Image: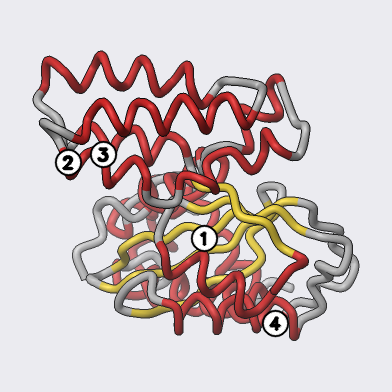
Amino acid sequence: MFSSKDLLNSLVVERMLAGVATRRHGDVAEPLGEKVESRATATSKSAISRRFVAATNKALEELMARSLCDLEVAVLMIDGLEVAGQCCVVADGTKVPVGLWLGDTENKTVVTALLADLVARGLATDSGVLCVIDGAKALAAGINKVFGETAVVQRCVLHKRRNLAGYLPKELASTVDRRLAVIFAQPDADKGHDAARRLANELEADHPNAAASLREGLEDMFTVRRLGTSGNLARTLTNTNCIESMISVARRTTRRVTR
């Protein structure tokens, strides 16, 4: 028990995830006396780093290999984050990370491989699944290829609002954003869709790029509303904040990593 590397590795991971730098582990260790601490080698920067790599490699292997047969999923959220210059596409079910896939961008090949791996590990979508994405065309294409008609797609309304603001002058962007917030909160999907189309027509003359951005994927902006969902649940399922909050934990933990 005393010589178990697993115990030491898990302790290292616990402290690293709490924000303790590799060079500071000796400062937070249990006091063992000056004589022992002067000869200790397990708390050096390199030793801590090796243990962290070993433990996280093992955890990642377990995550990527675990069976999903017992997981009942109604909603699957998919998003990407950049790690060391590469895109890591993440799939998340009810705040349970179910898969990761590495590539150079959120392209169809990467997304298809990720989703196919989930199916191979037993993820059941026969009863239907709602896929919430940030709006990338590659994500929607990958979902359609792997899940087919059993999946419906909801694009993130917050991403749409941010993207549209980028095509408009500052004084107009805030006004349009307020209108969009009301449109996307409309309980009646058809009324919301019609209002969004009218807004796009208004923008067409002076801001054609903004109008085109609003029209792109507009049908998928009201999927949750068409399912009859309302209230807090609708607000939760019409954006990707759930998975982004989980991803932010990884960003916060790795913010000081330089290599």
Query: Which secondary structure lies at badge 2?
Result: helix
Q: CA distance from mark 4 to mark 3?
A: 44 Å
- Label 1, residues with CA under 10 Å away: few <14, some 14-19, many ≥20: many
User: Is tag 1's residue or tag 2's residue first in the polypeptide sequence?
Assistant: 1
Query: Is the C-beta separation of discs 3 and 1 under 8 Å?
Result: no
Amino acid type, residue under disc 4 in the picture: Ala
Tell me if label 4 and label 2 are in contact, CB under 8 Å. Answer: no
| Res 40 seen here | no
User: Which of disc 1 and disc 4 is earlier in sequence?
Assistant: 1
Task: Report helix, strand or loop for mark 3.
Answer: helix
Q: Secondary structure at mark 4?
A: helix
CA neighbours of label 4 inside 10 A, class few (<14), some (14 to 19), many (20+)? some
Q: Residue at x 41, y 61 (%)?
A: 80
In the rendered image, residue 130, in percent from the top left (x then y), is placed at 70, 53
- The residue tagged 4 is 65
Tag 3 or tag 4, which sits nearer the N-term? 4
3D distance between C-alphas at marks 4 and 1: 20 Å
Q: Earlier in the sequence, mark 4 or mark 2?
A: 4
* Amino acid identity at mark 1: Val
Report the disc number at residue 13: 1
How far is mark 3 from mark 1, CA to CA?
48 Å
Label 1 or label 2, whichever lies nearer to me, is 2
Q: Is residue 132 left or right of residue 108?
A: right
Disc number placed over residue 208 in the picture, else none:
2
Which residue is denoted by mark 3 in the rendering?
211
Mark 4 vs 3: CB contact within 8 A: no
Q: What's the CA distance linking mark 4 and mark 2?
A: 47 Å
> Disc 2 marks which amino acid?
Pro
**176 is higher (above) or lower (below) than 141:** above
Q: Horizontal placement of 186 versus 217: left or right?
A: right
